[in-house]
Amino acid sequence: MQLNPYGEYAVLLAASLANEWPADRAGIEARTREFGMTMTFPEGPDDHARVSEVVQEWAAVVDAPPGAERAEQLNEIMASAAAFPRLTDHDGEGWHLHYRDVGMSFAAVLRSVFAVGTALHLTTRGMHRLRRCAAGEAPGDPCANVVVDVTRNGRQRYCSVRCANRDAVRRHRARQASPGRT
């Protein structure tokens, strides 16, 4: 049996959808493939809208303060979304765990995967390892992307090098303009 990467791939997939929402259901399913999900799901007429609701619900966990409040929100989602873990061997992946019932809708599967994956990510790496991009904290900066910290040191604050550089330039200019500089 292989180690299940539920935590990392699931939370990275959720962040990817939150940061760049696909135009249609096919785009969502393509994104799930990019992040390692191989199962196919029967198509439902409202999949695009329902998955959007799931991503918005997950984003509320991102926006909750690390600690008890975040855990409470995530626990509520898991209580209604996740099922007993079960061993499965599909699509040549080898034996692994699923935290969802068989026959769930596309949105329900993603809800379960995001909830359990986020819980695993936060409990194994730290409750602070999920946030919005620090560049967006500056007045007028539009970045609101989700940052999933998978670094060794646990200090990732920006969604991209571009945002980190933009914020560094902003801080440098503020220091240069401060009174008392010669």
Image (tube, helix red, strand yellow):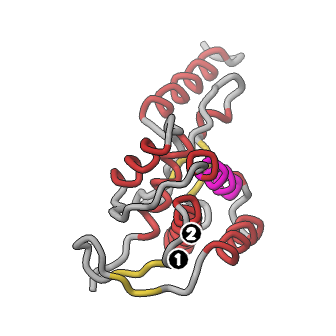
Q: Residues within 10 Å of mark 2 (few under 14, many from 20)?
A: many
Q: Disc 2 versus disc 1: distance between alpha carbons?
A: 6 Å
| Residue beneath the point at 46% across and 54% down | 13
Which quadrant of the figure contains the N terminus?
bottom left
| Res 80 quadrant in image | bottom right
Q: In this picture, is 110 found above or below 164?
A: below
Q: Is residue 52 magenta?
A: yes
| Residue toward you, 152 or 49 | 49
Judge left or right: residue 162 versus residue 114.
left
* Residue 149 on image: x %, y %: 49, 55
Classified by dominant secondary structure, the portion drawn in magenta counts as helix
Residue at x 61% of width, y 66% of height? 127
Q: Residue at x 62, y 47 (%)?
A: 52
Q: Residue 26, how many percent across, how many down?
A: 43, 44
Where is mark 1, residue-wise?
Answer: 100
Please state the extent of the stretch shown in magenta in the rendering: 51-62
Mark 1, other Cα within 10 Å: few <14 / some 14–19 / many ≥20:
many
Q: Amino acid at mark 2?
A: Ser
Pointer 2 with pointer 1, Cβ within 8 A = yes
Mark sitting earlier along the chain (2/1): 1
Q: Nearer the viewer, residue 104 or 69?
A: 104
Q: Quadrant of the C terminus?
A: top right
In the image: residue 89, left or right of residue 130: left
Q: Which residue is mark 2?
A: 112
Q: Is residue 161 magenta?
A: no
Nearest the viewer among 75 and 109 is: 109
At horizontal 45% and vertical 86% (from top left) the residue drawn is: 86
Q: Amino acid at mark 1?
A: Arg
Q: Residue furthest left?
A: 92
Q: Is residue 61 above or below residue 90?
A: above
Using the image as rendered, state which of residue 104 and residue 14 is in the foreground. Answer: 104
